[in-house]
Image (spheres, grey):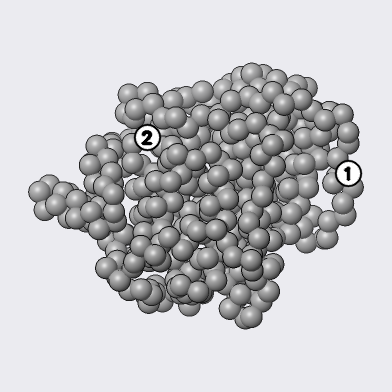
Amino acid sequence: MQRFKTLLPRSSFSLRTHSRPFSAQPNYAEHHVDDDDSQQQILVEGRAKSRAAILNRPSSLNSLTAAMVSRLKRLYDSWEENSDIGFVLMKGSGRAFCSGADVVRLYHSLNGGGNTEEAEQFFKTLYSFVYLQGTYLKPHVAILDGITMGCGSGISLPGMFRVVTDKTIFSHPEAQIGFHPDAGASYILSRLPGYLGEYLALTGDKLNGVEMIACRLATHYSLNARLPWLEERLGKLITDEPSVVEASLAQYGDLVYPDRSSVLHKIDTIDRCFSHDTVEQIIEALEKEAAESYDEWCMTTLRKIKEASPLSLKVILRSIREGRFETLDQCLVREYRMTLRGISKQVSSDFFEGVRARMVDKDFAPKWDPPSLKEISEDMVEYYISPLSEVASELVLPTALREPYM
């Protein structure tokens, strides 16, 4: 495992091997017949002692649909119960691992009067799969080669091994579309060193594979050109031992360090500015830093924040701060509430306006509502966190059956 030990303080983001015994009963989910689309969008490779799930919508950067998430959940449930399978692997086809949920499809469905119950079920299945991933009983390898955005991180980072490459691009740009980092993001981002999680969530800035290694979002780094050899090695393994899988990954790994232009060298400034209690205070600190240092990075960071939905910024900061003190399942339950509120239009239509401006019409001129931070009340933010009404049911995870994530 390669880690850059001197740049960042040690993070609490870590995983452990679970000890819950395998069930002796078969899981009949593996006999479910998927439709042709989901079979083509989630391909399966059978190997000696493992299975690989391949996200296969390259023209859409492997963005997730309801059918894809349902198929992943069924496959992983059945593979966990199958004693002939020692470990599981996930990767994407094309130039992306996964760009997140297919929000354009969701936008058109809901804007066209689509059934909100379908959207609720999509997110419920997605978040349940993230929890399954975070408590999976078998070693899991996610190969994050290419674009990894939004909930693409949720379906991969909770797993045991996360391989990144020189092609990896990681980001959470949800604030720019009037949404919030979800699918366990408030758990993952809040456990990054210092206040790096707040910075990434509020600005949507990107990390490359080397930077993901440095802040321990990833466990192994491999050049893209070496992936065929790495996968060939994994495919021949006859094991369910994490240490054996780890040794095979390390065999094709590379020792890497962030370059001088990396945002991780700004960690002290990030901590000074993003440790404040409110978005307004964070902006004020950045403005002061920019005036004193004439640092172009400060100006760019300010611009990114000011382009985002003001309501999303406040909701996101609240989410990351609460995530620091919650378990993975608690974060997912809260994020599910926030998600349904965000797509309901009851307080704001920022999600629909953000997707329209950046991904549909592409005029990049969203009209946020409310348009400024000063017009957002605490009650509006609290609404996103509060328990759901009778219209929508809460997310229920099998916490009694699984060990905690950490």
- Categorize mark 1 by other alpha carbons within 10 Å: few (<14), some (14-19), many (20+): few
Q: How many marks?
A: 2
- Label 1 belongs to which residue? 28
Rendered location of residue 92, percent (x, y): 64, 47
Rendered location of residue 304, percent (x, y): 32, 59
Residue sitting at x 73%, y 59%: 67
Query: Where is 357 relative to 142, above or below?
Result: below
Q: Quadrant of the C terminus?
A: top right
Q: Does 178 sit left or right of 69 as displayed?
A: left
Query: Where is 129 relative to 58, above or below?
Result: above
- Label 2 belongs to which residue? 193
Going from the N terminus, do you reach mark 1 or mark 2 first? Answer: 1
Residue sitting at x 61%, y 75%: 110
Residue sitting at x 50%, y 47%: 185
Q: Which disc number belongs to residue 11? A: none
Query: Do residues under tags 1 and 2 come within 8 Å of each other at their CB atoms?
Result: no
Residue 45 seen in the current view: no
Residue 120 seen in the current view: yes
Quadrant hosting residue 195: top left
Quadrant hosting residue 256: top left
Q: Nearer the viewer, residue 200 or 137?
A: 137
Rendered location of residue 255, percent (x, y): 45, 25
- Categorize mark 2 by other alpha carbons within 10 Å: few (<14), some (14-19), many (20+): many
- Three-letter amino acid code at the position of disc 1: Tyr
Rendered location of residue 87, percent (x, y): 73, 30
Instruction: Calculate the distance from the C-alpha at mark 1 to the C-alpha at mark 2.
Output: 42 Å
Q: Nearer the viewer, residue 128 or 112?
A: 128
Q: Residue furthest bottom?
A: 112
